[in-house]
Image (spheres, helix red, strand yellow):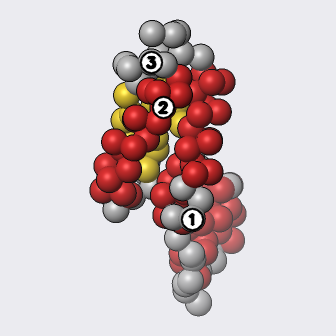
Amino acid sequence: MRPLSDAQLREAWSDFAKQRKHQLAEFHLLSRTVEVDGSVVTVALANSVEEPLLQSMLPDLLTYLRNRLSNPTIQVESILQKEEVNRIAYTNKEKLDLLVSKNPVIKELKDRLGLDPDF
């Protein structure tokens, strides 16, 4: 068993992703950045739909990585990454609330001037 270096693992991961280029969903999943901690590789998934996709290609991926890097202890884990959803402000009140969240002084200005956002 050879010690695992971060650069070698990332290169092997990238080569495996290139092999899956014709399968767009798999290539997209494999093109994400991965975290390497010892012999554990962690992939951040954008949503729960990607988990079955990762599980379906996991045996091939592990076999490839373990053979290429001569390290049978390599493991691949996944975590669900929460993405921030930016809401679009439509009403005047929502627009004001968005501005206040960016700069709280705007609320003080609105109160001092006695402005009504819904008028």
- In the image, residue 33 above or below residue 91: above
Left/right of residue 20 with respect to residue 80 in the rendered view: right
Residues at badges 1 and 2 in contact (C-beta under 8 Å)?
no
Question: Please, what secondary structure does the residue beneath circle 3 have?
Answer: loop
The image quarter in which residue 79 lies: top left
Residues at badges 3 and 2 in contact (C-beta under 8 Å)?
yes
- In the image, residue 99 above or below residue 12: below
Q: Amino acid at mark 1?
A: His
Question: Please, what secondary structure does the residue beneath circle 2 have?
Answer: helix
Q: Position of residue 11 (x, y in %)?
A: 64, 33
Question: Please, what secondary structure does the residue beneath circle 1 have?
Answer: loop
Calculate the distance from the C-alpha at mark 1 to the C-alpha at mark 3: 27 Å
Give the camera-side residue of 7 and 34.
7
Q: Residue at x 47, y 36 (%)?
A: 64
Residue under pointer 1: 22
Q: Residue at x 51, y 64 (%)?
A: 23
